[in-house]
């Protein structure tokens, strides 16, 4: 993507080819946790993409392309019994130790997401993880969302709590 003055924007380049997935969808999920660790440590642990498999239940995360920074592609495969959900995402912004933005661009999971680390007093960090998914299935997806949303929020919050415990105990990063 070109910005005024003819220069290339790294965030724009990272979003190139993602189509409508860059726009927020109506399926919004937010989870928040406080981690008893400095933001630099929390952020480094979060963007250790493949280690997310250790704290996101039933999920294997792998770096598909890149170094984990802007423009990198990541795949997270969640499997519960015979059900498999493949989440493809691209890292579109990294602002250590405060923010990382991704765009989910797969067939089912589409839309932007952001993780923010806010330093607090006493070497504590607040994490806010926010996702804006496009709902698949048209009207049926919109009708089902109010039923699915609480489970999505609980799952995301539990994963973040596990992440916090692992950072605080020194298992991560």
Image (cartoon, grey):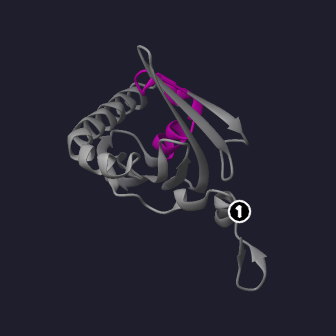
Percent from the top left, x then y, of residue 160?
A: 35, 36
How many numbered circles are shown? 1
Residue 141 image point, x, y percent: 33, 46
Please indicate, yes or no, whether residue 171 appears anywhere in the rendered image. no
Q: Can you say which quadrant of the picture contains the N terminus?
A: bottom right
Magenta-colored segment: predominant secondary structure: helix
Position in image of residue 13 (x %, y %): 71, 62
Determine whether 147 is above or below 171 in the image.
below
Task: Quickly name the residue at label 1.
Answer: 13
Q: Is residue 36 left or right of residue 99?
A: left
Q: Quadrant of residue 81?
A: top left
Spot the residue most to the right.
Answer: 6
Residue 113 in the image: state x and y as whole percent: 46, 52
User: In the displayed image of the protein, which residue is found farthest to the bottom?
Assistant: 5
Residue 89 visible in the picture: yes
Residue 48 located within the stretch drawn in magenta: yes
The outermost residue toward the top is 81
Which residue is depicted at the point 64% across and 63% down? Answer: 11
The residue carrying pointer 1 sits among few (fewer than 14), some (14 to 19) or many (20 or more) residues within 10 Å by Cα, namely: some
Residue 119 appears left or right of 95? left
Q: Is residue 26 above or below residue 31?
A: below
Residue 166, compared with residue 41, is above or below; it is: above
Between residues 92 and 112, which one lies in front from this camera angle? 112
The answer to if 99 sits in the magenta stretch is: no
The residue stretch that appears in magenta: 40-60
Q: Residue, x 29% and y 31% (percent of image)?
A: 158
For label 1, the SS is: helix
Q: Nearer the viewer, residue 112 or 167?
A: 112
Q: Residue at x 66, y 53 (%)?
A: 70
């Amino acid at each position: 993507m070109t910005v005024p003055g003819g220069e290339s924007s790294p965030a724009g380049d990272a979003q190139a080819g993602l189509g409508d997935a860059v726009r927020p969808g109506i399926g919004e999920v937010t989870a928040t946790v406080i981690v008893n660790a400095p933001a630099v440590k929390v952020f480094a642990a979060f963007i250790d993409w493949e280690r997310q498999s250790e704290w996101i239940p039933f999920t294997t995360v792998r770096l598909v392309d890149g170094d984990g920074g802007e423009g990198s592609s990541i795949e997270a495969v969640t499997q519960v019994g015979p059900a498999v959900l493949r989440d493809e995402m691209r890292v579109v912004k990294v602002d250590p130790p405060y923010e990382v933005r991704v765009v989910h661009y797969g067939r089912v999971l589409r839309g932007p997401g952001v993780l923010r680390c806010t330093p607090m007093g006493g070497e504590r960090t607040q994490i806010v993880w926010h996702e804006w998914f496009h709902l698949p299935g048209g009207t049926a997806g919109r009708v089902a969302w109010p039923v699915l949303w609480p489970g999505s929020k609980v799952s995301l919050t539990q994963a973040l709590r596990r992440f916090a415990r692992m950072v605080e105990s020194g298992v991560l990063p």
